[in-house]
Image: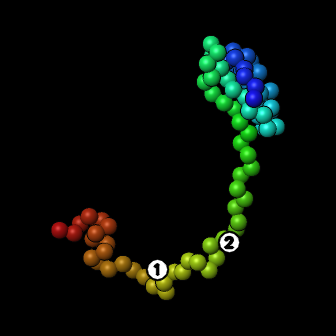
Amino acid sequence: MIIVPLAEAKNNLSKLVDEAAAGKIITIAKHGRALARLVPAGKPDPRRIGAMKGKLTLPDDFDAPLSDETLDDFEGTRA
């Protein structure tokens, strides 16, 4: 773990971010007190295309017109 004063971190942020990306943990301190930590972000979870295939179904009447009662509820015109 590397401890860097705040003023130095402001001047060398790009370098510190590169070091954090390489796996180092950098603590930023002010007056000797730790304020923040730069850590590697890690790899994002890969998204699988089609992961929900076969798990969702749409009813045959999915796009059928709504009843007047339901439309009134959506529009707030029902008494």
Which of these two is toward me, 65 or 47? 47
x and y percentages locating residue 53 in the rendered image: 64, 76
x 69%, y 26%: residue: 27
The crowd level at tag 2 (other Cα within 10 Å; few <14, some 14-19, many 20+) is few
User: Disc 1 designates what residue?
Assistant: 63
Whole-number angstrom distance, CA of label 2 to CA of label 1: 23 Å
x 74%, y 49%: residue: 43
User: Disc 2 designates what residue?
Assistant: 50
Task: Please identify the residue farthest to the top as the structure is shown.
Answer: 31
Question: Which numbered dot is residue 17?
Answer: none
Q: Is residue 79 left or right of residue 61?
A: left
State the image quarter where residue 68 is shown: bottom left
Q: Indicate the quadrant containing the C terminus: top left, top right, bottom left or bottom right.
A: bottom left
Task: Please identify the residue farthest to the bottom as the structure is shown.
Answer: 60
In the rendered view, tell whether residue 22 sits above or below residue 26. Answer: below
x 73%, y 16%: residue: 8
State the image quarter where residue 71 is shown: bottom left
Q: Amino acid at mark 1?
A: Asp
x 65%, y 20%: residue: 29
